[in-house]
Amino acid sequence: MARCAIIALFGEEILKQSSKFVEAMWDFDAFVFPLAFGVPRFIYPKAYAARDAFHEMGETFLNAAWEKFDWNGLEAQTKWELIRGTRFYCTHSKFLKERRFVLRSRSGMHLGTI
């Protein structure tokens, strides 16, 4: 069910690039509270490892998706497309990049929306 929801909202490219994406998402989800409360890395290294692995998948996706996406083509005007999914996410992604958010922040915003 998670795969279907991700494809419906964000396209299938992120799942094609990272075959373990859904598993990484649930691994990260298990550690959200220790990370949110700022538990130090040396006390909870698994939490930080799960977060870092998940973010790296997001960063890899964003770099590749940005290279493949034609902002002047028809795909920028459609309501849904394979690489980025819904137009909401396309617009959101463009907004963050144009405002010069660093890649890690853009990845976090994208993954947090998922």
Image: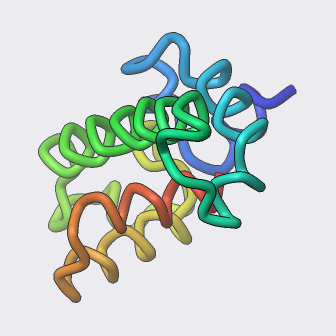
Labels in figure, total: 0
Q: Looking at the picture, how far across and down is residue 52, in whole percent?
A: 41, 38
Q: Residue furthest bottom?
A: 99
Q: Looking at the picture, how far across and down is residue 3, in whole percent?
A: 72, 26
Colour mode? rainbow
Q: Looking at the picture, how far across and down is residue 67, in whole percent?
A: 12, 45
Q: Looking at the picture, how far across and down is residue 9, in whole percent?
A: 66, 50
Instruction: State whether residue 14 is above or below residue 86.
Output: above
Q: Is residue 32 left or right of residue 66?
A: right
Quadrant of the image occupied by residue 95:
bottom left
Seen at 51% across and 23% down, the residue is 15
Q: Which image quarter holds the N terminus?
A: top right
- Please state which of residues 18 and 36 is positioned toward the viewer in this rendering: 36
Q: Residue furthest right?
A: 1
- Please state which of residues 78 and 107 is positioned toward the viewer in this rendering: 107
Instruction: State whether residue 34 is above or below residue 92.
Output: above
Instruction: State whether residue 74 is above or below residue 57.
Output: below
Quadrant of the image occupied by residue 59:
top left
Seen at 60% across and 64% down, the residue is 38
Seen at 59% across and 40% down, the residue is 43
Q: Residue furthest front?
A: 43
